[in-house]
Every structure is written in structure tokens, then in C-alpha cells.
Image (cartoon, helix red, strand yellow):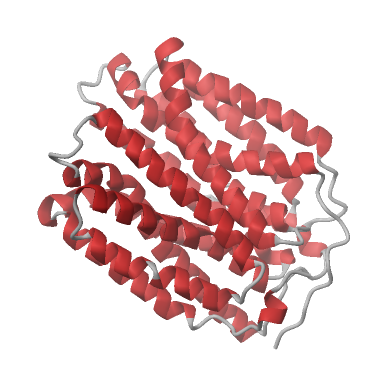
Amino acid sequence: MSAIAAPPVFAWPRSVSLLLNLAHAIDHMFLLIFAAAVGTIAAEFGFARWEDLMPYSVGAFFLFGIGSLPAGRLGDLWGRRAMMVIFFFGMGASAILASFAQNAWQLTVALVLLGAFAAIYHPVGIPMLVQYAPNPGATIGFNGLVGNLGIAVAAIVTGFLVKWLGWRAAFAIPGLVSILCGFIFVAVCPREGEAPAKRKGGAKVVLSPAALARAFMVMTVAAITGSLLFNLTTNGNGPLLTERFRGVVEDPATLGILLGLVYAVASIAQVIVGRLIDKYPLRRLYFWIVVGQIPLFYLAAHAQGWAMFVILTAAMAFVFGAIPFTDAMIVRYVDDRIRSRVAGMRIAVSFSISSLAVWALGPTVKSMGFAPLLLLMAIIAFVTASMVFLLPAETAENASPG
């Protein structure tokens, strides 16, 4: 059923790998600049409340998900280097265009373009990064850590730029940085001799068509459930801490620092899990990471104060620790010639469905509270754990690199 791919005979220059990782931070950061600056923008555009301006960003996130389909196809058939060049210049130009917007609809157009270019990274940049990696799990884990740092940087950098130079600079300056990265990428990244679709091999475990279809089904379901948990937690943890620390810590700044510590500690899990992926069978490791979420969400549903802080940190470590697996499954089971297309299909489905979590979060908490929501997260984790057993079997031998 399986065969081991030959070890890579080529590796990207370190500067290329650095830029591909930096692109992940850019991808997440740029999509959150608007959210971080929305209050200031709303006031300038004459909106009474920032909430009234938020719906104008929906197009960006829709394109971010659905745009993965054509981006992945072009990455395989046209070339990943070319698509990443488009990514850097497109992200930069779109951000600069947003800085010139004079009303909400002009800003909407710029944000839609930004979302379309942002859709390139996940189905193209990550397969390109791991294309020649001898230790893909560790590579994916570190890449995920950098992406999460982009989320933190968006809030910090945007806040300072808005304060010192205004919201337009919060778009324009990162936009110029992205364009500069594009020029450097063109200079340091070797040209591809042929598009990925024309190359040979690239999967660690070569599967039959039926087994590949089953693996893709598991990847998609796991990506949906993982994205649901990620969106529910990252969007709901702030209000959750505020509620559970009432009477213990109520200062918003202190609560923000505590939440930052939760994410900082939890992000390290991606690096650790990435390294473990290179050493142990994927199915067994993934199962225990997901199972670990179940009791933690259950305990979080009933915890208060500092106990909640400890449990939430552990729960987020397992949530973040599960993130590398969907990309690792693509590396493990999918031929490199079609990886970007498979990643694009998986991302388009999972991102589209999981975006509903953000829409439903407020009404759900308002009607039921956080305890039932956390118990629902435990059920979602149970569903993921059940699906893991459908992954193709592998041995520790063929799970190891090279």
C-alpha cells in the first residue's frame, strides 16, 4: 500500500524559507489590520458605531476562503514561485490601495482584493515550503508559530501606527514592507524548472485512489472541526476570561496580557508537535492530541478564576497543537504534483464552513452562556478523534523522514 519517497536532492536557500515563513505572518496580519483599526476608520467615515462598519469586511474573508481553489490550481499548474511573487506584490498593493480609501465602499473593494491575494498563501506557500524539507513536520510547526505571531503583530503594530501616524499608515507601511519582500523574493528564489504538476513523486506514503479519497475526506473533516474550534476559541476567549475572572481581575489591560500569555504558551505546542510528527505515526499522534482537548474543554466549562486560566492555556495548547496535522497529512499522503490543488479544496471548504462559528458565537453565548459552548467544543473534538481512525495505517518506519 505504501512506498517511501527518495530523500530530497535540493533545498530552498535559507533566505527563501525565511521569506515563505514571513509570508505566513503577513497573510494573517494584513487580514486583521482592518479589525484592529475599525474604530478609528468608522469615526472618520461618519459611522456612529464601529459595529456598523464591520460587515464591509465580509468580502475579504469570503475571498480568503473560496480563492484558495483557483490559487491552488494555479500553484500546481503554473508554478508556486510565480504565485508567491503575485502574493507579495498583490498584498502590498491592496493594502496601499486601502490606505487611499475615502469611504466604506472604496475600502471594501480594497479589502476584497486583499482577501483574494491572501488566499494564495495557504495552498501555495506551505506546499512550497515543505516541498524539499527533510523534516516537514518541524517545518510546518514552526511555520504555524510564525503565522500566529502575525495575529499578535497585527494588533500591536496597527495600534501603534494608528496612534502615531493614523489608520492609513497602518495599511500603507505594511503594504510597502510586503512589496519590498516581493522584490527580495524575486532576487533570492531560484526559478522553477517546471511546474509542480509536471514533476515526479513527492508523497511519503503512496496511496491507492480509494485510500487517497478516504484520506482527503478525513483531512477535510479534520480541517473543518479544527477551524471551528480555532475560530470559536480565538474569537471567544477574551469575553470568556472577562466573565470567568469577574471579581478576581477586571482590568482590561491585565486581562489582555493574560490572554496574550495563553496564546504565547499555546503557540509553542505547534513547534513541539511538528517535531513529533517527524518521529511518530501520524494517526496515533493526532488521535491523542485531539483526545486531550475533550477533558480540557469539559473542565473549562466549569472553571473560574486562575483555574480557568491554567485550563484554558492547556486547552489552547492542544487546539494549536492540532493545527499542523492537516498540512502534515497532505505532505504524508498527497503527491507533490497536486498538493496545492488538494490544499486549496480543503481550505475552501473548511474556511467557508468554519466562518459560521464567528457569526454564531455572539448569539450562542447570549442565549446559552459559555458553559454549553465549551461542552459543544468537547463534542466537536470527539468527532475529530473518531474520524482519525479512518486515516490510512502507517508504521513508525514510514512515518520517519527520508
In-image side of 13 versus 214 (left or right): right
Residue visible at 74% across and 58% down in the picture = 131
| Camera sees residue 11 | yes
- Residue 197 image-quadrant placement: bottom right
Q: Quadrant of the N terminus?
A: bottom right
Residue 272, placed above or below residue 389: above
Residue visible at 46% across and 36% down in the picture = 152
Q: Among all residues in the image, which is located at the extreme top?
A: 165
In-image side of 231 versus 115 (left or right): left
| Camera sees residue 111 | no
Tell me residue 13's x, y (percent): 82, 44
Residue visible at 48% across and 78% down in the picture = 388
Residue visible at 64% across and 83% down in the picture = 394
Residue 138, placed above or below residue 182: below
Closer to the camera, 353 or 215?
215
Q: Among all residues in the image, which is located at the extreme bottom?
A: 1
- Residue 296 image-quadrant placement: bottom left
Tell me residue 263's x, y (percent): 42, 45
Q: Quadrant of the C terminus?
A: bottom right
Closer to the camera, 67 or 365?
365
In-image side of 82 versus 112 (left or right): right
